[in-house]
Image (cartoon, rainbow, N blue to C red):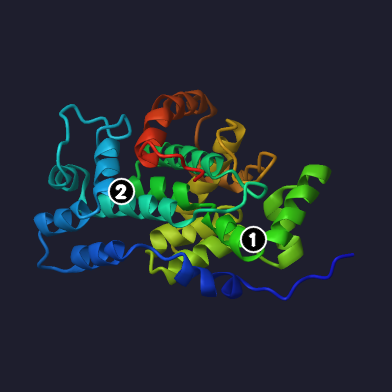
């Protein structure tokens, strides 16, 4: 029997948060948004300095995800119409997607990883809409980032991750449970710890950390429940893959908490399908996500 390594969540993120850090502009953007004297023009100017990010935010703003009737041509318009905090959330998701590059293909196909993440984000946003939640982009972003801890583990402990992947494929076990049995923690906890180290708000970091165990939700249990359900839906639809081979079990407590009608699920699936391709195109910016 393999000996359990002496690892911790803190050990997972202590180097990665520096090596794989968010671009400086994101810190500048957050500071500007939090400053009481900043204008929409100030915020738009910071975003506009990154031409690739600007193009992707505009593609997203004009996608079916938002459904505005008039074309949004400038970042100033996007910030005005979508909202300051919502644009910051979208910038966060896009920034993280650019951070992790070069992970070996035998561990994960990065294009498939982000496609699963985007599907989870779309399902999360749609579920939040049905629950009459506000600031829907935080649900979308939490969905995109929900498995980022797995990328950290692929970087820090690739050999152990490969063993766990092979074990789950052979035994039919769920990967997040195998992680916990082997390591004492799972990728959800690692992802939350990384986001906290990056000073990402708890409204995103906590649901990421509890999406496999919603009972741990303290400040944002409803957000964690929505993210859990969205992850199950994305797996069931077989859109992309982050490493998990099988569909995670739906927590019955989540079903009861959200009180979602089973009649709504076909509509949800149809809405995910109708927005998925254009959202992927906007987020990937026409580049190969696996690069």
Q: Which residue is mark 2?
A: 135
Q: Secondary structure at mark 1?
A: loop
Q: In this view of the protein, which residue sits in the foreground, 218 or 58?
A: 58
Crowding at label 1, few (<14), some or many (≥20) Cα neighbours within 10 Å?
A: many
Check disc 1 and report the residue beneath it.
Answer: 186
Residue 166 lies, in percent from the top left, at 77, 48
Disc 2 element: loop
Q: Is residue 4 left or right of residue 11?
A: right
Mark in front: 1 vs 2: 1
Badge 2 crowding class, 10 Å Cα cut-off, few under 14, some 14 to 19, many 20 or more, is some
Residue located 59% across and 61% down the image: 155
Task: Out of 10 and 22, give the one closest to the viewer.
Answer: 22
Q: Quadrant of the N terminus?
A: bottom right
Name the foreground residue: 226 vs 240: 240
- Tell me: 26 left or right of 246: left
Residue 85 lies in quadrant: bottom left
The residues bearing labels 1 and 2 have C-alpha atoms spaced at a distance of: 28 Å
Is residue 188 visible in the rendered structure shown here?
yes
């Amino acid at each position: 029997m393999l000996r359990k390594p002496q690892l911790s969540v803190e050990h997972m993120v202590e180097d990665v948060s520096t090596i794989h850090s968010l671009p400086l502009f994101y810190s500048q953007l957050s500071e500007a948004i939090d400053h009481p004297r900043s204008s929409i023009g100030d915020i738009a100017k910071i975003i506009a300095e990154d031409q690739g990010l600007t193009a992707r935010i505009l593609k997203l703003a004009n996608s079916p995800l938002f459904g505005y009737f008039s074309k949004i041509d400038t970042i100033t318009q996007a910030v005005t119409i979508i909202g300051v905090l919502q644009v910051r959330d979208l910038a966060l998701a896009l920034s993280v997607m650019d951070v992790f590059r070069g992970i070996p293909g035998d561990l994960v196909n990065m294009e498939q990883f982000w496609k699963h993440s985007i599907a989870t984000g779309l399902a999360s946003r749609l579920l939040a809409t049905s629950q009459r939640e506000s600031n829907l982009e935080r649900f979308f972003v939490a969905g995109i980032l929900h498995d980022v801890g797995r990328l950290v583990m692929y970087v820090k402990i690739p050999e152990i991750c490969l063993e766990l992947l092979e074990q789950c494929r052979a035994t039919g076990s769920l990967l997040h449970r195998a992680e916990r049995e082997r390591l004492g923690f799972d990728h959800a906890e690692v992802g939350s710890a990384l986001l906290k180290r990056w000073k990402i708000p708890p409204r995103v970091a906590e649901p990421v950390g509890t999406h496999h165990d919603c009972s741990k939700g303290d400040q944002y249990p409803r957000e964690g429940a929505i993210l859990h359900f969205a992850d199950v839906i994305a797996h069931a639809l077989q859109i992309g893959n982050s490493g998990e081979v099988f569909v995670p079990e739906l927590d019955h407590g989540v079903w009861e908490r959200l009180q979602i009608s089973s009649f709504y699920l076909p509509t949800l699936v149809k809405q995910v399908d109708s927005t998925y391709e254009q959202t992927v195109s906007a987020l990937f910016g026409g580049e190969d996500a696996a690069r």
